[in-house]
Image: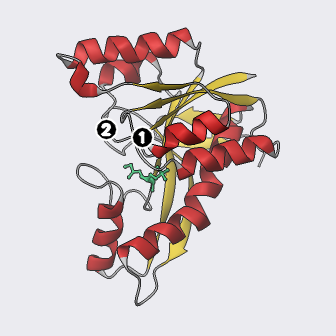
Amino acid sequence: MLKIAVLVSGGGTNLQAILDAQNRGGIVNGKVTCVISSKADAYALERAKQADVPGEVLLRRQFADQDSYDDALLALLERYQIDLVVLAGFMTIISNRVVGQYQNRIINVHPSLIPSFCGDGFYGLRVHEAVLKKGAKVTGATVHFVNEICDGGPIILQKAVGVLQDDTPEQLQRRVMEQAEWEILPQAISLFCQGKLDVAGNQVKIIGI
Ligand code: GAR
């Protein structure tokens, strides 16, 4: 059974989708064993508590520099003997040092179809605002491995979601979550935990499909 850490910063609806999938047997060979939040008041911590999962708070500003923050994050991951790190709305940048230590063992969910509407400055509601401003007719979500390039790692799963004419950013965000993120994130985690993701360069092959 692989041990999973979910890193969060906000509401934690993606964390909830993972926990719900786990309860239905949808995460094969994996278990969420800790939740790490970059904010002390993130509602995601409440969700962790209700699911009996230990919650930890790690504030970037409590550390003098990147190196000491990384030390603390790596120590936490080691303490829980984590096999897979899941960024689920985690708004603190993961340094190259941490990425290097967990090569192809960190995955992120992004609320657009990468390579559109991603990279520096594209997070949360801003992504959906940009989609609407551009007039795109289709958006969606992407689950990918994290590498040194912001939102640039190998893509595991994507799902498209239609943009409706009168969508507000909030409505679009909700639909992308419901129809894409909450589905493909648990699915990608389960594939990883079963050893079904074969990474070669920037391509991910799913074994057995
Ligand atoms: C989600 O839409 C997630 O894709 C996004 O933040 C939201 C977190 O919601 N992440 C990013 O924008 C990362 N670039 P949640 O806390 O309810 O899961």
Residue 57 in picture, x, y percent from top left: 41, 26
Where residue 129 appears, x then y in whole percent? 30, 71
Q: Name the residue under label 2.
A: 149
The image quarter in which residue 124 lies: bottom left
Circle 2 crowding by C-alpha within 10 Å: few under 14, some 14–19, many from 20: few
The residue sitting at the bottom extreme is 165
Query: Are the residues at dot 2 and dot 1 in contact (C-beta closer than 8 Å)?
Result: yes
Q: How far apart are marks 2 and 1 (CA)?
A: 7 Å
Q: Residue at x 64, y 50 (%)?
A: 17
Quarter of the view holding residue 179: bottom right
Q: Name the residue under label 1.
A: 153
For residue 26, the mark is none
Kind of residue sitting beneath label 2 = Ile
> Residue 67, how many percent across, how many down?
24, 14
Is 26 drawn above or below residue 132 in the view shown? above
Q: Is residue 176 above or below residue 15?
A: below
Query: The residue tagged with tag 1: helix, strand or loop?
Result: loop
Q: Residue at x 32, y 78 (%)?
A: 132
> Can the viewer see residue 162?
yes
Is 139 rendered above or below residue 99?
below
Mark 1 residue type: Gly
Please give the name of the residue rendered at 36% of the width and 46% of the height, measured from the top-left corner: 151
Percent x, y of residue 188: 63, 44
- From this view, report whether residue 156 is shown above or below residue 128: above
Extreme left residue here?
64
* Residue 88 shows up from this direction: no
